[in-house]
Amino acid sequence: MTSPRISAFADAAHRFCAFCETRCPLDNEDLVALAKLLASLHGAALELPDAFDEGDLAAEDTVEPLPPALWAAPLDRYWEVLDPLALDPDEPAAASLEEDVKGIYLDLKMGLAQYERGHAVAAAWSWRVSFWSHWGAHLVGAQRAVYFYFSALGSAEG
């Protein structure tokens, strides 16, 4: 039986991936939908159990990245400090919301490949490890960029 926390994360991952596969953000409404999906993923990721299982490593070989698309959202490029905890931080670096979304998508799909083959604990391990090592940074960068975009407009109803 799959843990409710793993199932909740899998549901959030499925919703995010379906959004990415069917909608290229085109307008502010799409950015609000993306922000909600990112928040859902963030909360669910923090609830993933700390468990290890390799599962079926071949499952991850079947994952394809999102195809190149024309990003048409009113927001893509933004600036970020790569290590905000550094006492003497590097100069801000350019980041891309489109690249953030693609990075998150690929890491989530890796875990979903495990999950869909019946390896729920392996999926949770994949999602949890990659959250703390890769896609979590993309997620919070994207959340921050979308927040400041709407903050500059006055609200998410722009």
Image: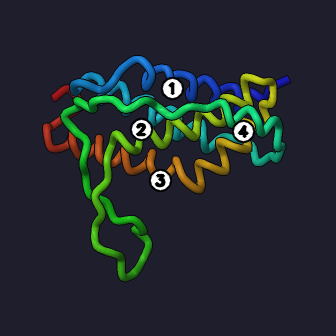
Which of the two labelled residues, at mark 4 and mark 2, occupies the earlier sequence position?
2
Residue drawn at point x = 42 percent, y = 76 percent: 86
Give the residue pinned by disc 1. Answer: 17
Which residue is the site of mark 2? Answer: 101
Foreground pick, 108 / 59? 59
Label 4 to label 1: alpha-carbon separation: 16 Å
Q: Quadrant of residue 126?
A: top right
> Hey, what amino acid is under mark 1?
Cys
Which mark is first along the chain, 3 or 2? 2
Q: Secondary structure at mark 4?
A: helix
Spatial separation of the CA atoms under disc 4 and disc 2? 20 Å
Q: Earlier in the sequence, mark 3 or mark 4?
A: 4
Of tags 4 and 2, which is closer to the observer?
2
Dot 2 crowding, Cα within 10 Å, few <14, some 14–19, many 20+: many
On residue 124, the disc is 4
Q: Is residue 127 above or below residue 13?
A: below
On screen, residue 21 versus residue 120, left or right, reads: left
Numbered disc 2: secondary structure: helix
Residue topped by disc 3: 137
In the rendered image, residue 105, in percent from the top left (x then y), is placed at: 50, 35
Q: Are marks 4 and 1 in contact (CB under 8 Å)?
A: no
| Amino acid type shown at disc 2 | Val
Q: Earlier in the sequence, mark 2 or mark 1?
A: 1
35 or 19: nearer the viewer: 19
The residue drawn where x is 65% and y is 42% is 127
**Sequence-earlier tag: 4 or 1:** 1
